[in-house]
Image (cartoon, grey):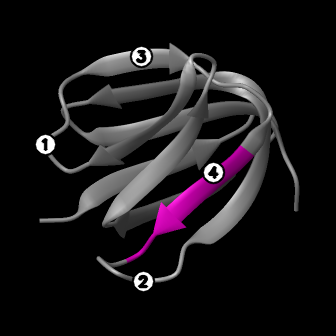
Amino acid sequence: MPLHFELVTPAKHVRSDDVHMVVVPGAEGEFGVLEGHAPFMSTIKDGPLHIYKTAGAAPETIEVRGGFAEVGDNGLTVLAEHVES
């Protein structure tokens, strides 16, 4: 079952997708999120967000600057202050 992933900034809704896994640059260190992850919230630091569309796939990387990541019943939402395009 895929993980629902949302990436938003104050300016726009950047991405909404079903993916295998996302690795987030958390303030306390990187953490990976798969479908079924326990509810969790973390601040994020500047760095790469790695999005794995399928198991074993090469990751897509998006640079994010600050913000929060929240894992809940409807998946992972990353609220970034800024996203490098």
In the rendered image, the quadrant that contains the C terminus is bottom right
Q: Residue at x 80, y 33 (%)?
A: 46
| Position in image of residue 54 (x %, y %) | 33, 78
> Which residue lies under the disc numbered 4?
49
Query: Are the residues tagged 1 and 4 within 8 Å (C-beta)?
Result: no
> Which residue lies under the disc numbered 1?
36
| Mark 3 Cα shell of 10 Å, populated few (<14), some (14-19), many (≥20) | some
Q: Main secondary structure of the magenta part?
A: strand
Rendered image: mark on residue 41 = 3
Mark 3 or mark 4, which is nearer the start of the sequence? Answer: 3
User: Taking 2 as reference, is 16 left or right?
Assistant: right
Q: Looking at the picture, which amino acid does disc 3 mark?
A: Met
User: Taking 52 as reference, is 79 left or right?
Assistant: right
Tell me the SS state at disc 2: loop
| Position in image of residue 24 (x %, y %) | 54, 41
Residue 15 lies, with reference to residue 76, above or below; the image says: below
Furthest residue toward front: 29
